Image (spheres, rainbow, N blue to C red):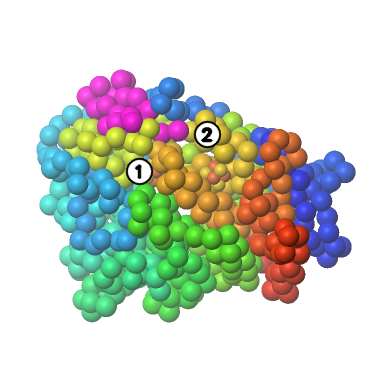
Amino acid sequence: MRFVIDALGPQGRQRFVYDNVTSSLTQGDGRPVAMPFEIPAPAPWQSVSAISRDTPGLKGGPFRRIKIQLGLQCNYACSYCNQASQRPAQEGAGRVDAFLATLATWLSVERHRAPTFEFWGGEPLVYWKLLQPLAEALRQRHPDAGLFLITNGALLDTAKVDWLDRMGFAVGISHDGPGQAARGPDPLEVPATRAAILDLYRRFKPQGRVSFNAMLHRGNASRAQVQAFFVALTGDADVPIGEGHWIDAYDDAGVRACLRSPAEHAMFRRQAFAEARAGCASNFGALRGKVEAFMASIAHRRPASSLGQKCGMDRADHLAVDLHGNVLTCQNVAAGTAAPNGQPHRLGTTAAIERVALASGTHWSRRPECPRCPVLHICRGSCMFLEGPLWQTSCDAAYSDAVVVFALAFELLTGTVPLRIDALEGEPLPDTRRDLFGSDARVGAGAVVRRVIPIHSMSPVRSSA
Ligand code: SF4
Ligand code: SF4
């Protein structure tokens, strides 16, 4: 679908046309936009299968990413947790020896490409007695495999840091920086835990094996403040910050943590764009990666048919399992629950992996909204199993987040800042999606006035995003 973009640059207003199916970006008169610098070509695109309840996805090896769900117990209770609604339905954790006994019968991996094993909770360190023997057995069987976990850090101590280091783990430490109150207690306020977290950081950083993972929500909407927090904590100007995107809404608490009014959305977009443009969000690897990926999609004409879901769990070679051998929609769900579309989150079992059917999610191409969305290549359809008002709230948040990436990449490619975007064919976009930074305000009898947004007075964006 094609969109017309009004943008502002040193030469004044300019018009462009963007096609989200072919990733072409042209001037208003049809001339292609010349790329201002060389953008390396990514690996060749491949078409993906568009899963849905009526066209279930398959799972099959060789597997590249295996997410092992140890259980959903957690020692924290984050207000916006995406697992909260699942927790009451979880089964007991299962047995490591039984899991390992059948592993070789279903786990095929590439000979020259080691897989990554991820260990998920809840809080994975709550399951220390399962985690330790399981990871050690997997390390023995797959010496080159990546091992990864995300922890809130509250249970870290010197012995656990030593073990994680010895095992070659990469670790994400969930912490919202200045917005940590939304997660509950702060492990950094406990001296021994703070020391263990900083010890881990110092030991893992040189090999690129650690990040602080922060989420954006109403109580934590400034990437610049998050970055300043972790730079001050670690004394490291280059501290890596993971995740860093807006939360999805999985329940009422999640909805309350999302942006509410058009004015809040506009304010967030302006602030996030300004912060990134001024280089105050440069430690957010995912933000940088999305800007680069979007520029590459335009430079090399990425077809929309090659876009899977944002989390990758629609892929056949990405697998989420629990220790009972249940294959799950993803690591955030319990086997006994159903997705909002009525399909079970338990997709089958590892014992019959050829019969696993992913019907609990909906690929973006099978939703009415996403194919008509200008930020499709950046967002990739939000969470694949959400539906109804929760999906809509998550979609709205994802749009505002992705608009910032769109504008950053667009400015790097064209030297202009996009202010308005609209569909060239079919239904116009809603006002709040057309007007990217809230530069239009309705007054009196519906008349529109244009506000001047002082985004051009800010310092230039760093080339890294
Ligand atoms: S912002 Fe919403 S409509 Fe656009 S791709 Fe994401 S989920 Fe789909
Ligand atoms: S399906 Fe993907 S986006 Fe949705 S909860 Fe699972 S991992 Fe997250």
Residue at x 34%, y 67% (from the top left corner): 182
Does ligand 1 reach within 8 Å of label 2's beta carbon? yes
Whichever of callouts 1 and 2 sits on the residue coming sooner in the sequence is 1
Q: Which residue is mark 2?
A: 367
Quarter of the image where the N terminus is located: top right
Q: Amino acid at mark 2?
A: Arg
Classify the position of the C terminus by image quarter.
bottom right
Residue situated furthest front in the rendering: 445
The residue that label 1 is drawn on is 116
Coordinates of residue 427 in the picture (x, y in percent): 68, 38
* Secondary structure at numbered mark 1: strand
Say whether residue 446 is magenta.
Answer: no
- Picture residue at 35% right of the left edge, 70% below the top: 180
Look at the numbered disc 1 and say if its residue's Cβ is closer than 8 Å to ligand 2. no
Amino acid marked by disc 1: Thr
Q: Nearer the viewer, mark 1 or mark 2?
A: 2
Write the residue at 75% across / 40% down: 424
